[in-house]
Image (cartoon, grey):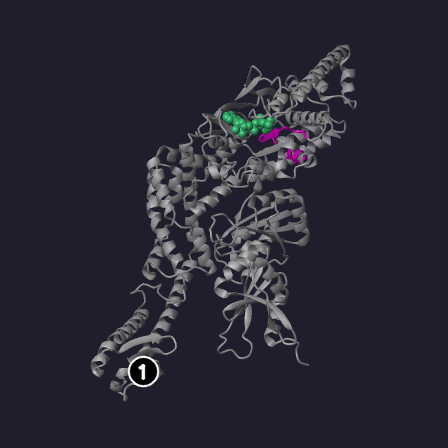
C-alpha cells in the first residue's frame, strides 16, 4: 500500500508527534516551514501568508519564514506564550540519500528564551519548577540567560505561591494538578506565567550537574523541583548547560517576609498605577551601571535581610562611598564600561556566543583590575572583601586578546575573527590567499604587456570565478594557445588561463579552509572559557554587588539619606522620616518630614485619623519603606533612624482603596487578615489602611476594632492603623500600647489646609463633607449632610451617657450586654479590660504553652534548643490535664 503523504511530509509528521504542544519550525533549505494546523495558526498569529504544498494525496496548508529572520518570529510566538520546536537538517542535502535527516535541536519556551530581545532588558527571565512531597513544596527557579538557579522548600501552598510571585516567572512547570492549584490561589498575580505540564525528573542530571555537597543537603521537595527543572531543560535545550553550576538554595524565612499584596501595595518593584518600575522604590534606587547590578538590586529588594551583621556590612560600604564621592564616581565610570558578564557567560556556556561576545568579555575583564584598585583604596572593609580576593580571570582575558581581533564580524562562519600570529597554519593559509590575490592583481598588468591589449581587464563573478575580459575590437590579439574562451558578451569575450584557474583554486581552497579553521579555533577558545565558568560567575557576582552598593550610595548622597542604626531591640525611632518616592515626585515642593516612635513599653500601635488627602497612607508606607531600605543595606530618608530588625511586614488596605488592583473584595481582605494574624510576630510591622471598609459601618468598625485588639493583646507587633472611624479613638483608653495620632490640618474661614504633619491626638473631624464641597457637590446636599451628621453625633452622645450609667450600676452586666448582637463598637471600648476573655476551652497552662510558641525566636534557635523547648512544652501540657 502506498503511503498517503510524500516521504518529506511523513517525516514531518513523525517529528511533529514528538512536540504536540509546540509550533514545529521544520527546516527546508533556507526556510523554516510550518504545516497543517501549525501553519494555519502561525499564519494568523504572525500575520504571514498561508499557502499550501502538495503533500501526496492532498494539498497541505503551509507557511514559512526565512531562516535568517526566524528569530523574530520565534520570539513573537514565545512572547504570546507558545512554544516553538526548531527542527534542523542534520546532513548536507547535496550528499544525503533520500529524505534529508532532520531532528529537533531545541524547543524554545517562554522560560527558556536565550536570544536577546531587541531592546535588551537587564531583567531576569525566569523558569520555575514546582514539586510537592509529603514534607512540603519545592521550588526551583532558573534564568537560563544568566545561569542563576535558586531553590527553596516551603510548607504550604500559600507560601509556595507567594514565593513564586516574587520571581514573576515567564513559565512554570510541574504536575498538572499542582499547577492548577497554584494558579487558582494566585488569582491575578501569576497571569503572565505560562503553565507547562511536566512531571519527569532527572536525578542523574542532578548528580552530574552539581557536586554532592550541594545536592545532598537539599531538602527532598527542593531536590525534586531541581530534578524536574533539569529534565525539562534537557528535553527542551538538548545540550549541557555548564553555567547552571551552583544551586543558590535559601530559606524563605531567612529574609524579611512580605506577601505579594504587601509588595505591590508598598510599590517596591512596580508602581500600582502603571506597573512601571519608574514610579516604584526600585526605580528610585536603581542607579546601577551594569545589567547584572540592576538584576541583583531587584533580588535584594525582593529579599531584604534579617541578619544584622550582614546588613551592617552593606551599610559600611554604602557609608564609605557616600563620603567619598570621587571613588564612587570612579567606580561608576569603570562599571559603565563593563558588559553583562552573566549573560556573556550564559551565551558561552550555551554555545551561541560570537567573537564579539568574547571581545566584550575581554573588555570587561580588562576593567577588573581598576575596579579592584578602587575597592581596595576605598577604605571600606566590605568592598575590600568583595573584590580584594576575587579572581580577576586575567588568563582568560589574555587568551581572548591573543586570539580574537579587536573588531570581529557578527558571524562566526565567515572568518575574520582570529588575530594574525595566533595560529601558524591559519597564517600560512592566509598568506597563500593573499599571495594568490596579489598574483591576480598583478596579472592584469602582465597580460596587458604580453598581449598589447591596453583595455584588457581581470574580473570576478560568482558563476565563472576569475576571468580575463577582452573587448571585441581587440579579440584578434588574444593568444589563442593560452586563452580559453568562457563566455561571450555583446561587447567582447571572457577568457581564462590554466595558470589563472590554478591560482583561483588555491585561493578558494585556502579561503574555505581558513573559514573552517577560524571557526574551529574560535570554538576551541569558547570551550576553554566554558570550562572556567564558575570563576567568571564568581567575579560577576562580586561586580554586581559592588554595583548595587554604589547605586545605594549614589541615591543616598543625592537625596541626603542617613545611615540607620540597627538594633536587636524592639524600639523603632525615626526622626524626620520621609516617603522616598513621594518626596522624589514632589520635586521642588517640600515634603513634610515626620517622626515615628514605637516602643515596647510605650506605643506599639498608632491609630491615625485625619481627613482625606491628609497624608495618612503616605506616612504609614514611609515607615515600612524606611525599614525595608535599611534591611537591604541602603541609607534611609530620615534625619535619624534607629530601627529594629523587622521579620515580616503586612499591609492591609480597605477594600474601597484597592479598586486599582481590581481584585480586592471584602472577602479577599478578610482572608488576608486571617493570614496576617496567623503569621505576624512581635518583630513584625503591620500596616492597616482603612480596615473594614466595604461592609456596613458598624460591622466594619467592629472588625477593625477586634483586629486591633488581637494585635495588641496577642501579637504585640508594631502596628500603624489609619481609619475613618473616628469612634475608634476610644481605644486609646482601653489599650495600653495604643495611642491616637492624626494628620494636622489648619482650618480658617471654612478653608482647610493640609499640613501633612503627624501629631498626637485624634482628629476631630474627617472633613469628608468639606471634601465633598471642594469637589463641587450641590450646596443643598452639603447642607443636608451637615444637618444629618449633627443628628448622629447627638444620638451617639446620648447613647454613651446611658452606657456610662449602666456601667456604674453593675460592670459585669454591662459587659455581658456587649456581647449581645446589635451593640455598636463604640460602647465596647468604654468597658476596657486589659485582655478580652478567651473561650473557656483553653486553660491557663495551655495558654502559656501557646505564648511560649508564639514568642519563641525560631530564627536564632539551634536544633537542640528547639528540642528542649518541645520537651518543656509537652511537659506543661501534660501537667495541665
Ligand atoms: N508628608 C508629606 N509632605 C508633603 N506632601 C504630602 C505628605 N504626605 C502626603 N502628601 C501629599 O498628599 C497626598 C495624599 O496623601 P495620602 O494619599 O497619604 O492621603 P490619605 O490621608 O491617605 O488620604 P485618603 O484618606 O483619601 O486615603 C500625597 O499624594 C502627597 O502628594
Ligand atoms: Mg489613604
In this orientation, which residue lies closer to the viewer: 594 or 179? 594
Q: Residue at x 53, y 54 (%)?
A: 212
In this view, 140 is above or below 810: below
Q: Secondary structure at mark 1?
A: strand
In this view, 162 is above or below 61: above
Q: Quadrant of the N terminus?
A: bottom right
Residue 321 image point, x, y percent: 38, 36
Judging by the rendered image, the residue that carries numbered circle 1 is: 495
In this orientation, which residue lies closer to the viewer: 714 or 39? 39
Q: Residue at x 69, y 32 (%)?
A: 875
Residue 849 image point, x, y percent: 68, 30
In this orientation, which residue lies closer to the viewer: 317 or 82? 82
Q: Is residue 745 left or right of residue 454?
A: right
Which segment is the magenta one?
Answer: 672-693
Q: Residue furthest bottom?
A: 481
Whether residue 568 appears in this view of the structure is no
Residue 853 image point, x, y percent: 64, 32
Amino acid at each position: 500500500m502506498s503511503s498517503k503523504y510524500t516521504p518529506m511530509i511523513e517525516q514531518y509528521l513523525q517529528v511533529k508527534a514528538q512536540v504536540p504542544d509546540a509550533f514545529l519550525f521544520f527546516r527546508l533549505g533556507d526556510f523554516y516551514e510550518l504545516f497543517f494546523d501549525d501553519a494555519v495558526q502561525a499564519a494568523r498569529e504572525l500575520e504571514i501568508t498561508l499557502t499550501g504544498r502538495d503533500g501526496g494525496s492532498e494539498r497541505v496548508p503551509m507557511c514559512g519564514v526565512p531562516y535568517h529572520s526566524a528569530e523574530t518570529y520565534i520570539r513573537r510566538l514565545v512572547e504570546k506564550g507558545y512554544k516553538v520546536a526548531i527542527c534542523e537538517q542534520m546532513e548536507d542535502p547535496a550528499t544525503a540519500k533520500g529524505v534529508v535527516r532532520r531532528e529537533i535541536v531545541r524547543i524554545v519556551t517562554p522560560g527558556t528564551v536565550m536570544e536577546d530581545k531587541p531592546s535588551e532588558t537587564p531583567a531576569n527571565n525566569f523558569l520555575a519548577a514546582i514539586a510537592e512531597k509529603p514534607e512540603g513544596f519545592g521550588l526551583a527557579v532558573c534564568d537560563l540567560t544568566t545561569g542563576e538557579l535558586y531553590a527553596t522548600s516551603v510548607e504550604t501552598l500559600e507560601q509556595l505561591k507567594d514565593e513564586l510571585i516574587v520571581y514573576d516567572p515567564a513559565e512554570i512547570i510541574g504536575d498538572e494538578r499542582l499547577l492548577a492549584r497554584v494558579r487558582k490561589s494566585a488569582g491575578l498575580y501569576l497571569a503572565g506565567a505560562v503553565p507547562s505540564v511536566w512531571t519527569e525528573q532527572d536525578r542523574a542530571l542532578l548528580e552530574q550537574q552539581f557536586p554532592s555537597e550541594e545536592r545532598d543537603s537539599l531538602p527532598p521537595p527542593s531536590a525534586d523541583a531541581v530534578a524536574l527543572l533539569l529534565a525539562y531543560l534537557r528535553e527542551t535545550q538538548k545540550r549541557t548547560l555548564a553555567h547552571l553550576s551552583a544551586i543558590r538554595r535559601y530559606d524563605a524565612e531567612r529574609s524579611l517576609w512580605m506577601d505579594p499584596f504587601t509588595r505591590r501595595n508598598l510599590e517596591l518593584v512596580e508602581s500600582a498605577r502603571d506597573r512601571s518600575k519608574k514610579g516604584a522604590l526600585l526605580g528610585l534606587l536603581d542607579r546601577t551601571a551594569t545589567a547584572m547590578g540592576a538584576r541583583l538590586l531587584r533580588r535584594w529588594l525582593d529579599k531584604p535581610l534579617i541578619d544584622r551583621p550582614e546588613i551592617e556590612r552593606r551599610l559600611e560600604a554604602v557609608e564609605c562611598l557616600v563620603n567619598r564621592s570621587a571613588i564612587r564616581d570612579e567606580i561608576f565610570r569603570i562599571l559603565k564600561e563593563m558588559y553583562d558578564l552573566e549573560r556573556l557567560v550564559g551565551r558561552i556556556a550555551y554555545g551561541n556566543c560570537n567573537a564579539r561576545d568574547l571581545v566584550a568579555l575581554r573588555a570587561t575583564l580588562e576593567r577588573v583590575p581598576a575596579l579592584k584598585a578602587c575597592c581596595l583604596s576605598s577604605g571600606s572593609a566590605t568592598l575590600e572583601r568583595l573584590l580584594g580576593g576575587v579572581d580577576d580571570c586575567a588568563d582568560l582575558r589574555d587568551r581572548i586578546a591573543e586570539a580574537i581581533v579587536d573588531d570581529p564580524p557578527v558571524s562566526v562562519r565567515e572568518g575574520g575573527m582570529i588575530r594574525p600570529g595566533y595560529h601558524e597554519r591559519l597564517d600560512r593559509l592566509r598568506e597563500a590567499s593573499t599571495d594568490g590575490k596579489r598574483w591576480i592583481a598583478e596579472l592584469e598588468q602582465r597580460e596587458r604587456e604580453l598581449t598589447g591589449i591596453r583595455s584588457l581587464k581581470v574580473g570576478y563573478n560568482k558563476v565563472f570565478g576569475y576571468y580575463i575580459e577582452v573587448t571585441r575590437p581587440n579579440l584578434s590579439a588574444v593568444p589563442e594557445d593560452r586563452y580559453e574562451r568562457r563566455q561571450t558578451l555583446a561587447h567582447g569575450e571572457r577568457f581564462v588561463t590554466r595558470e589563472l584557474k590554478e591560482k583561483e583554486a588555491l585561493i578558494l581552497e585556502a579561503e574555505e579552509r581558513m573559514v573552517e579553521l577560524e571557526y574551529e579555533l574560535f570554538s576551541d577558545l569558547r570551550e576553554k572559557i566554558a570550562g572556567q565558568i564558575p570563576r567568571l560567575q564568581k567575579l560577576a557576582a562580586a561586580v554586581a554587588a559592588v554595583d548595587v552598593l554604589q547605586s545605594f550610595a549614589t541615591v543616598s548622597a543625592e537625596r541626603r539619606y542617613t545611615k540607620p542604626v540597627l538594633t536587636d531591640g524592639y524600639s523603632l525611632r525615626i526622626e524626620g522620616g520621609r516617603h522616598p518616592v513621594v518626596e522624589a515626585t514632589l520635586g521642588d515642593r517640600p515634603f513634610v518630614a515626620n517622626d515615628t516612635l514605637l516602643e515596647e513599653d510605650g506605643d506599639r500601635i498608632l491609630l491615625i485619623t485625619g481627613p482625606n488627602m491628609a497624608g495618612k497612607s503616605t506616612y504609614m508606607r514611609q515607615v515600612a519603606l524606611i525599614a525595608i531600605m535599611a534591611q537591604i543595606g541602603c541609607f534611609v530618608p530620615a534625619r535619624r533612624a534607629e530601627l529594629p530588625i523587622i521579620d515580616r511586614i503586612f499591609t492591609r488596605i480597605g477594600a474601597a482603596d484597592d479598586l486599582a488592583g481590581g481584585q480586592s473584595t471584602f472577602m479577599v481582605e478578610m482572608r488576608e487578615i486571617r493570614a496576617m494574624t496567623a503569621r505576624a510576630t512581635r518583630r513584625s510591622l503591620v500596616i492597616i489602611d482603612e480596615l473594614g471598609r466595604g461592609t456596613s459601618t458598624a460591622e466594619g468598625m467592629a472588625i477593625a476594632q477586634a483586629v486591633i485588639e488581637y494585635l495588641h493583646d496577642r501579637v504585640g507587633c508594631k502596628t500603624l492603623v489609619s481609619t475613618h472611624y473616628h469612634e475608634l479613638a476610644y481605644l486609646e483608653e482601653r489599650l495600653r500600647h495604643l495611642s491616637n495620632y492624626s494628620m494636622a490640618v489648619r482650618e480658617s474661614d471654612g478653608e482647610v489646609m493640609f499640613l501633612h504633619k503627624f501629631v498626637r491626638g485624634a482628629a476631630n473631624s474627617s472633613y469628608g463633607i468639606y471634601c465633598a464641597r471642594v469637589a463641587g457637590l450641590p450646596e443643598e446636599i452639603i447642607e443636608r449632610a451637615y444637618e444629618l451628621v449633627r443628628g448622629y453625633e447627638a444620638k451617639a452622645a446620648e447613647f454613651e451617657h446611658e452606657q456610662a450609667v449602666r456601667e456604674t450600676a453593675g460592670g459585669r452586666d454591662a459587659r455581658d450586654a456587649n456581647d449581645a448582637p446589635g451593640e455598636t463598637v463604640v460602647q465596647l471600648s468604654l468597658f476596657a479590660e486589659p485582655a478580652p476573655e478567651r473561650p473557656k476551652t483553653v486553660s491557663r497552662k495551655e495558654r502559656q504553652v501557646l505564648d511560649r510558641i508564639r514568642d519563641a525566636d525560631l530564627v536564632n534557635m539551634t536544633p537542640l534548643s528547639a528540642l528542649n523547648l518541645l520537651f518543656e512544652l509537652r511537659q506543661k501540657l501534660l501537667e495541665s490535664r
